[in-house]
Amino acid sequence: MNAALPLEEVHRRIAHACKIARREPEEITLVAVSKTRPAQAIVPLIEAGQTVFGENRVQEADAKWPELRERFSGLALHLVGQLQSNKAEDAARLFDCIHSLDRPSLVAALGKAFDKLGRRVPCFVQVDVGEEPQKGGCPVAEVPALLQAARHAVIPVAGLMAVPPAGIEPAPFFALLDKIAADNGLAGRSMGMSGDYETAIMLGATHVRIGTALFGARA
């Protein structure tokens, strides 16, 4: 498969959604979610011009990205999966952005890791918009307190992130995340995946996390 073709199609659809929403495509960061994909599947996308990638697990990212970053300059790596507190220092060393800050214990662990490394990585606070505790995410009512804790720990908060419940219309959940972000004066909204990113863009997404539409269905 020519990696440039799905990348061009995703960019075309992002531009179309932006046109409808009266936004500029440059406002949208496309995070190519490369979890479970081997390096040989990622390289063609890099060669086609994609620079921002997302991984779900610290260990998996550590196994394949140092070598890729030696080969290619200008890449950014985002953690889009759940983060265990005991992996905070590894994540702080490896990633350029973390999308899953969701609890006070992780705020403490990341703050400590950032202090130790002398490096402060932008983080999105993950919000449990669908009240699905199994997914992770901060309960909606607790978001202001978590943001305050993050600021106290000198964690740069890029915005909010959400994964709507599967199998139902995502628009209300995207609208809810947009409202919570606006209420808290946050610019970033990490929301929208392969099946719903156009809807997310129309409702304020700044970062869309796309895997299947770029890499094809996982085996």
Image: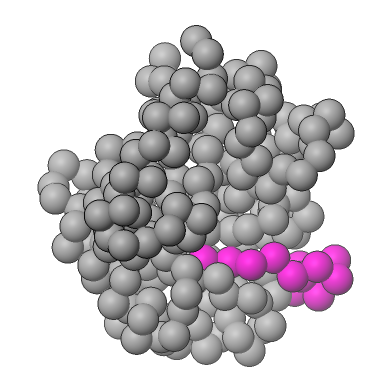
Q: Which residues are magenta?
A: 112-125
Q: Residue 42: horizontal and vertical position, in percent? A: 62, 25
Q: Quadrant of the C terminus?
A: top left
Q: Residue 196: horizontal and vertical position, in percent? A: 27, 44
- Judge whether residue 74 can be spotted in this image: yes
Against 175, is 5 above or below? above
Residue at the image position 66 percent from the left and 46 percent from the top: 77
Please give left or right for residue 23 compared with residue 85 in the image: left
Please give left or right for residue 71 compared with residue 80 in the image: right
Residue at the image position 81 percent from the left and 39 percent from the top: 73
| Furthest residue in direction top, as rendered | 1
Q: 137 or 174: which is nearer to us?
A: 174
Residue at the image position 31 percent from the left and 69 percent from the top: 177
Against 34, is 58 above or below? below
The colour scheme used here is one colour
Please give left or right for residue 57 compared with residue 138 in the image: right
